[in-house]
Amino acid sequence: MTLPLPQGFLWGAATAAYQIEGAAAEDGRGPSIWDTFSHTPGRTLNGDTGDVATDHYHRWREDAAAMAELGIAAYRFSIAWPRVMPEGRLNQKGVDFYSRLVDALLERGIAPVATLYHWDLPQELEDAGGWPERATAFRFAEYASRIGRALGDRVHTWTTLNEPWCSAFLGYASGVHAPGRTDPAAALAAAHHLNLAHGLASRELRAVTAPADGRPAWQSVTLNLHHLRGEEEAVRRVDAVSNRVFLDPMLGRGYPADLLEDTAAITDWGFVRDGDEEIIAAPLDVLGVNYYSPTLVRQWDGVSPRESADGHKAGAASPFVGCEEVEFAAQPGPYTAMGWPVDATGLEELLLRLHRDHPGVPLMITENGAAYGDEVGPDGRVRDDRRITYLRDHVAATRRAIGAGVDVRGYFAWSLLDNFEWAYGYSKRFGLVHVDYATGERRWKDSARWYRDMIAEPDATGAGTGGATGS
Ligand code: PNW
């Protein structure tokens, strides 16, 4: 059985500024929390930093040409706040970089999907308290307004935040991401101020952007929703503090009562002021969903040694605040190089759940992909068959969800290029295109050729049928 794709479905690829650009001190860019964090000994693997990364800041023309060859309809990138507004001033050279990139995309018929915040908070805002501080949300809205005015005649889709869960809970609770703080109450305040920032920025963008082609720009936000399986009470708790803490206020339901109860010992939520929930509920045209793996949870008996399959070391601070009684259980493989289980049915189930819980909200898969230890063979080829299988099965899962009535508008592979994988530095390769970090040289992996062929003929590659189960 072949499942039809909706008209105008966007096949794309995604990246993020700090992971690919480099040029950390060029053309007036200021420091972000990720510059500070990566330059602090012990924070990233091998002390890797984004100082040079893939040098996309200088190689963007070549990268745009590769996108055109892939045949993608849309490119999802992020704008570096500290490049565009260091110390709160507009930096025209920074704006010009993104303006040239957007023009190059449009010339090639590729729709620009721009994310305003993919984790690179200007350092001076962290010095003033960071996301746990309410004022940061208002600084973000100013930035949104300025960049919206500069690019709003050409950008197809605006995404306010990428994965606010990571910003709040990996940044301020477990501390494995910048700024590396371990304060659960601060993490919950950060989550609220990220929500507020999203609402305020959406309002600004709606007011100042108007694509020249007459089509209104889509407003969106991207969440890394945890697809949870396991015991009911454990699922409910983790769902509240990782999914519904963002989903519910953004989609107009306010904060869930069970979340406030579960976290009452950590904070009284006094940082939520009258009117905030209305601002956060700004209209959304499409909800971005990043999916890599499912999560398996159960109640911990309080005695036996806990599994730590959620990626943080035993004894280290957990990002799942208020979930001290939950155990993150190991799942069957195969696994990617991140140690994440490969399970495409999780994506299908997640899409169906969103469709059921929030009918009428269009969805877009803004990231999906896999890291493997790719090597260039003696013949110059990168044979990444496992990535092809991963992508094929997840595209098939997406199409099954569409066939079941879920409104999915696009699918973006993570990532266009191998890049700086945050705390893992350059050790994890997610790209369709291989990058030699010594020379900056790009080389298509087999998966890039597969993705190109799939986009050209979605039904001819095994990704168009209901057959693949992906498990
Ligand atoms: C996402 N977790 O990060 C990001 O949006 C990308 O920048 C990143 O490169 C990609 O996924 C692959 O990791 C995540 O611990 C990092 O649950 C960590 C988690 C989830 C997403």
Image: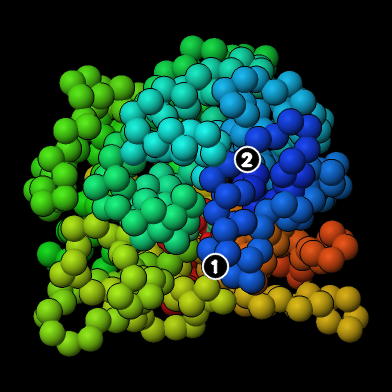
From this viewpoint, is residue 412 visible?
no
147 with respect to 138 (left or right): right
* Three-letter code for the amino acid on which mark 1 is drawn: Gly
Residue 132 x/y as whole percent: 34, 38
297 with respect to 442 (left or right): left
Q: Nearer the viewer, residue 25 or 12?
A: 25
Q: Helix, strand or loop at disc 2?
A: loop
> What residue do we see at 44% from left, 76% from top?
341
Q: Which mark is residue 42?
A: 1
The reply to whether dot 1 and dot 2 touch (C-beta < 8 Å) is no
From this viewpoint, is residue 209 visible?
yes
Residue 357 vs 424, above or below: the answer is above
* Three-letter code for the amino acid on which mark 2 is drawn: Pro
Its colouring scheme is rainbow
Residue 184 x/y as whole percent: 26, 52
**Cα distance between the residues tagged 1 and 2:** 19 Å
Q: Which mark is residue 31?
A: 2
